[in-house]
Amino acid sequence: MKILPYQPDQSGMAYSVGTTLDRFIKSKQSDFPFASGELSQLLRDIALAAKIVNRETNRAGLANIGGAFGQTNVQGEEQQKLDVIANIRFMRALSKGGEVCAIVSEEEDSVIDLQNGSGKYVVAIDPLDGSSNIDVNISIGTIFSIYRRKTPVGSPIQEEDIMQPGKEQVAAGYVLYGSSTMLVYTTGFGVNGFTYENSLGEFFLSHPAIQAPKDGKIYSINEGSELEWTPGVKNYVDHCKKSQYSARYIGSLVADFHRNLLKGGIYGYPSTQKNPNGKLRLLYEANALAFIAEQAGAIATDGVQRILDIQPETLHQRTPLWIGSEKMVNEAMGFLNKKREAVNL
């Protein structure tokens, strides 16, 4: 009987599909000796819900689940049918997993207490970012933040469990539903991206150890709000045009952020006359992307301070956001803070 050691086939007969998300998560469990596997399982639960939302998104045009739902959420924004569907899917996945004690969702007015006595984690989530783009087949996404609860496991949920600054996150990520579906996340040890393989039903590692370029030539901002900008914002955008930067604005936060993360660029959603406190939500949009950005070597600020240092005061608190390549964000802050520096002198 002959026994031969296995040698991987190097021929072109079959391409390598790489490392699955599940295997990657298991390989990183040693990074969290305190977690005992719960955080890993929580990430798997999110990935499962993302697969289901991906399926629903892909069939939206055929299943009559596009368009408006007929209600508004707590933000005063018209809910789309897929907003509601995505919220239900993630709620179910997170409640059945057993690792989560409470959820903050863009689609819910209040904190959802899962009444899970053993849950160690709080999840803040925007189940479907950019949902107004669904009906025109433009990329949309999911954004999530994960925190360890502060109070003892088994005790009632308290405000201190929920109102944590972004620097307290133990994990954060987003799912991009586009030409391909990607899950990108960090647990504070770098950023990794996984692409969904539909025929196998698995996420595979496709973008290991993502590092944002230090500089870029793309700026992403809604120029329809120009009349409500401060002089500093106007001057910076004029500078971008004079420098012949490329203007790229999709209107889906996840899609704009993802492009700039990989190619180099800056995304800006400043305060305006209409929204003096900004428009993006701190707990489940800005914090998650800021954590990812910093882990990839980029910067995230509200124009004055680091996003991750902001202490939230309300559940659906809004914030201005400037996020992207280090050099571009610092350059933008020079324009935004020029008047303030002059006064300080």
Image (cartoon, helix red, strand yellow):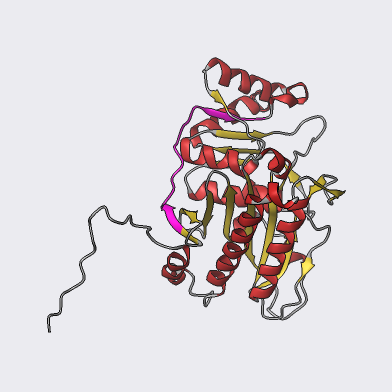
Query: Which of 152 and 240 lies nearest the eye of the viewer?
Result: 240
Residue 306 in the image, given as x and y percentages of width and height:
61, 44
Residue 145 in the image, given as x and y percentages of width and height:
63, 58
Locate residue 66 relative to residue 110 in the image: left or right. left
Q: Is residue 337 visible?
A: no
Locate residue 45 relative to residue 201 in the image: left or right. right
Q: Residue at x 57, y 45 (%)?
A: 178
Report if residue 210 lies within the magenta region: yes
Magenta stretch: give its range.
Answer: 204-221
Q: Residue at x 46, y 71 (%)?
A: 29
Locate residue 150 relative to residue 5 in the image: left or right. right
- Which image quadrant: the C terminus? top right
**Is the residue 98 above or below the residue 48 in the image?**
below
Q: Is residue 66 visible?
A: yes
**Is the residue 101 above or below the residue 266 in the image?**
below
Q: Residue at x 24, y 64 (%)?
A: 8
**Is the residue 147 above or below the residue 285 in the image?**
below
Report if residue 78 lies within the magenta region: no
Residue extending farthest bottom: 1
Find residue 241 and report its image quarter. Answer: top right
**Is the residue 24 above or below the residue 211 in the image?**
below
